[in-house]
Image (cartoon, grey):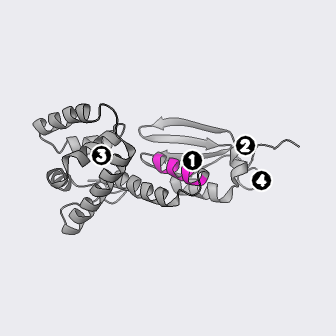
Amino acid sequence: MPARPFSMRGARPSRFAISGVAGWRGLVNSTPLCQLYFMKIHAKVVGPETYSISFGETEIILQGGEIKTLLMQLMQVMAPGGDAVGKQDGRRLEFLNHIKTANDVGIQKLLLVADHHDLLALLKSTEGETAIHDKFFDNMSANNAKMFNEDLSYEFRDGLPDKDRREALDRLIKLTRKLELDGDLVFEKPGRSE
């Protein structure tokens, strides 16, 4: 007997939205993987850094870095055994989402004390993340920004090895924790405006 596509009709309203990754986590935890396999999945951009992903009749709205978190969670579900790596990558992803909310003085201090190559690796690995690039380049002098752009072009002309990216992000995570404990780096709480 052929498998039927998964439907959530009857258990919940026929069309509903789940916001954020927590909603995705609930969907995955409550739906067997074999049922997820047969669902129609559609993704689209609905606004600046806002995405809609539909799983069958369930729509999930993701904003900004939540899409990367979703991809990490998908990989953890679909590639079991990578839990240790998955947790470390989750920590790195959380750092990248968190650094966007850092205060300008803290970013300037980070630019002064962090290893230049680590900062280049961060910027290279987040080329599509305009919020992160804006946060860093807006806190540099024109000459420093020019130097970083030139170094990005030269240093990684053959790409950024994943091992180098992971190691650089891990060192930056440790450094930002130290700067945060020292009071130099402050992160804005989500939903708070300046």
Q: Which residue appears farthest toward the right when viewing the image?
A: 1
At 34% from the left edge and 35% from the top edge, which residue is drawn?
159
Magenta segment's dominant SS is helix
Instruction: Identify residue for label 2.
Output: 38
Q: Nearer the viewer, residue 115 or 112?
A: 115
At 50% from the left edge and 40% from the top edge, which residue is drawn?
51
Type of amino acid under label 1: Ile
Range of the magenta residues? 68-77
Q: Earlier in the sequence, mark 1 or mark 4?
A: 4
| Mark 1 in CB contact with mark 3 (< 8 angstroms) | no
Q: Is residue 119 magenta?
A: no
Choose mark 4 or mark 3, whichever is in front: 3
Instruction: Identify residue for label 1.
Output: 60
Choose mark 2 or mark 1, whichever is in front: 2
Choose mark 4 or mark 2, whichever is in front: 2
Q: Is residue 75 magenta?
A: yes
Q: Is residue 102 above or below residue 62?
A: below
Label 3: which secondary element:
helix
Type of amino acid under label 3: Leu
Q: Nearer the viewer, residue 76 or 181?
A: 76
| Measured Cα–Cα span from mark 3 to mark 2 | 37 Å
Q: Earlier in the sequence, mark 3 or mark 2?
A: 2
Quadrant the N terminus occupies:
top right
At 12% from the left edge and 36% from the top edge, which residue is drawn?
142
Label 4: which secondary element:
loop
Does residue 11 show up? yes
Q: Which mark is residue 92?
A: none
